[in-house]
Structure formats: C-alpha cells, structure tokens
Image (cartoon, rainbow, N blue to C red):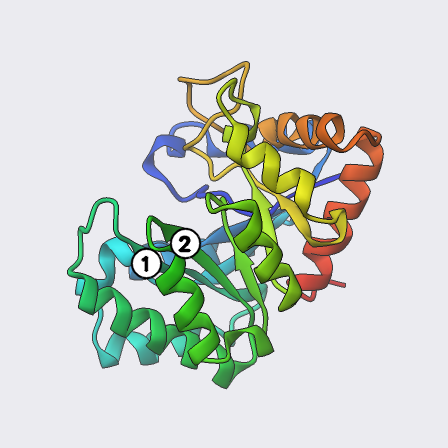
C-alpha cells in the first residue's frame, strides 16, 4: 500500500471526475492521501474531502502565493479548523521566490505566523520552498519549527541541505520530477537520505511523472515515484512502499 503525502484533489481539474480519480487510486494500492490547503477556500475544501473520502486526510494553511490574502482573522479561522476530524497538519506554507506572487516580506510574515500557529495546536507543518532554500531553513530554525515536525514537500534543494534537515528530524518528500531524465539533483538527494526520512507524493494535478509527463497527475501515479526510489536505492518496491507508509503515518500521527 502507498501513501501519497501531498495531493490537491480539491483542484478544479478534478471537478468532473474526482470520484473516479480516488477510486483509481484505491485500485492502484493507495490507502492514504494527504490533501493540503493552499488558501482559505482550499483549506475548507480539504476538510470536506477528508470527510467524504475514507483515504483522504487534510492539512490547512495558506501557500506563499496567497500570503497577501492573509490577515489575523483568517489565521484565527485556520486555527479553528484544526479541531476538525482528520486535520493532521498545517500546510502548505513557506516561501516562493520564483514567482513572487506575494511580496517577500508578506510571505515571510505569514510563514512565521503559521509556524507559530502550528506549534500552538501541536501539529506538524508541510513546507513549500522554491528558490528560498537558505531563508526557509533559517526561519524554521528561528521559529523552532522542528519541535513539532517539518516535512519538506516536493524537495528541490541540495543533497547537503537535505542532510541538514534530516539531522534536525525533518522529512523529505519526493515527487514526480525524480522520474525525469534530467533529475540529477533529486537522485543525489535520494541517494543521500536514509529511507527512514523519505516520503513520496504526487503534488497532483501537477508534476506528473514519466511515463505520463505532460498530462494531468493523479494519486495513482505515485507508484512511479516509489519505483524510481527503489531503483536508486537498490531495494524492493515493497520496501519503499512499506517504509514511506510508516514514515507518513508516524509524521501525520495517523493510527
């Protein structure tokens, strides 16, 4: 069985066939899917999906792209959502200096505020980091985020920085790009990190792995990520499936 540690099933691209997508996931051995929020609306939808589908779990939070929409009232509303059943994390939160859809100072402010909220409610966080590697690490250290748990979603940093994260007890999640022909950096990360600290994800509907690259991604394709990790590490697919499942269930405190 496989745990897709990051999927956006609330995305509009699934509106016409969401039930079928989730049924396909089950048929392909997916027993758990973590669905994080990206803004207030998608956080609400994430909770609704977790309520409707037995294999779906929720995280609530605001992505750095939408940080400029945040205010104190929204933060308190998100905090209130953490009491809902199957809300297991705060996310996805972080910094994105590639697109800069929200001003960087605003991104930093609400990244910190959401980390503090996560600590108040004792939930781990799901971190988005794009072209902000050093700043993300520094903020996580300054806010003592590692105390409640850090998961680096769709990790794109160096193997050396990944080692630094693991030393602090953080987890590294690997997505579809590991299957691309030019995936040198991601391969180095998988080589460097013990299986005890790895998770697998789709980030669907984005980042579709080979051989479906260019098409809409979905949770059933997470098996291609697991297959590639097994190949890189020289272990069986079953071991990757079992260990990443154990890691994700432990991290998100799912019994």
**Quick check: 31 left or right of 105?**
right
Q: Nearer the viewer, residue 46 or 147?
A: 147
Q: Residue at x 55, y 35 (%)?
A: 186
Task: Please name the residue that numbered disc 2 is placed on.
Answer: 128
Question: Which x, y percent locates residue 208?
Answer: 47, 26
Numbered circle sitting on residue 83? none
Residue that lies at the very extreme toward the top in this rendered image: 211
Front position in the image: 30 or 251? 251
Q: Quadrant of residue 207?
A: top left
Q: What x and y, as percent, mark residue 224?
A: 64, 25
SS assignment at label 1: strand
Q: Tell me where residue 127 appears, x and y as whole percent.
A: 45, 58
Disc 1: which residue: 95
Q: Quadrant of residue 94?
A: bottom left
- Mark 1 vs mark 2, CA separation in Å: 6 Å
Residue 77 horizontal/vertical position (percent)? 33, 76
Residue 109 visible within the image: yes
Farthest residue to the bottom: give it: 120
Circle 2 residues within 10 Å: few <14, some 14–19, many ≥20: many
Question: In the image, is 81 to the left or to the right of 85?
Answer: left
237 over 48 or under it: above or below = above
Q: Are marks 1 and 2 in contact (CB under 8 Å)?
A: yes
- Earlier in the chain: of badge 1 and badge 2, it is 1
**Which residue is located at x 69 percent, y 66 percent?**
253
Q: Secondary structure at mark 2?
A: strand
In the image, is residue 245 above or below residue 140? above
Q: Residue furthest front?
A: 160
* Label 1 Cα crowd, 10 Å radius (few <14 / some 14-19 / many 20+): many
Q: Residue at x 37, y 40 (%)?
A: 11
């Amino acid at each position: 069985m496989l745990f897709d540690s990051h999927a956006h099933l609330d995305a509009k691209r699934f509106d016409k066939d969401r039930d079928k997508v989730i049924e396909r996931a089950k048929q392909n051995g997916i027993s758990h899917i973590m669905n994080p929020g990206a803004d207030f609306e998608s956080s609400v939808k994430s909770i609704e999906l977790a309520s409707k589908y037995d294999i779906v779990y929720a995280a609530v939070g605001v992505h750095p792209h939408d940080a400029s929409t945040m205010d104190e009232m929204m933060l308190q509303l998100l905090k209130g959502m953490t009491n809902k059943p199957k809300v297991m994390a705060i996310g996805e939160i972080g910094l994105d200096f590639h697109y800069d859809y929200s001003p960087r100072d605003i991104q930093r402010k609400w990244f910190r505020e959401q980390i503090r909220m996560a600590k108040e409610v004792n939930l781990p966080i799901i971190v988005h980091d794009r072209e902000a590697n050093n700043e993300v690490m520094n903020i996580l250290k300054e806010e003592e985020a590692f105390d409640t748990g850090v998961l680096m979603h769709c990790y794109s940093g160096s193997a050396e920085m990944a080692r630094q994260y693991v030393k602090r007890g953080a987890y590294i999640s690997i997505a579809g790009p590991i299957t691309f022909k030019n995936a040198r950096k991601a391969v180095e990360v998988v080589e460097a990190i013990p299986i005890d600290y790895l998770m697998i994800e789709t980030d669907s509907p984005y980042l579709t792995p080979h051989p479906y690259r260019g098409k809409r991604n979905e949770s059933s394709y997470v098996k291609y990520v697991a297959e590639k990790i097994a190949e890189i590490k020289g272990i069986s697919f079953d071991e990757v499936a079992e260990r990443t499942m154990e890691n994700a269930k432990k991290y998100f405190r799912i019994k």
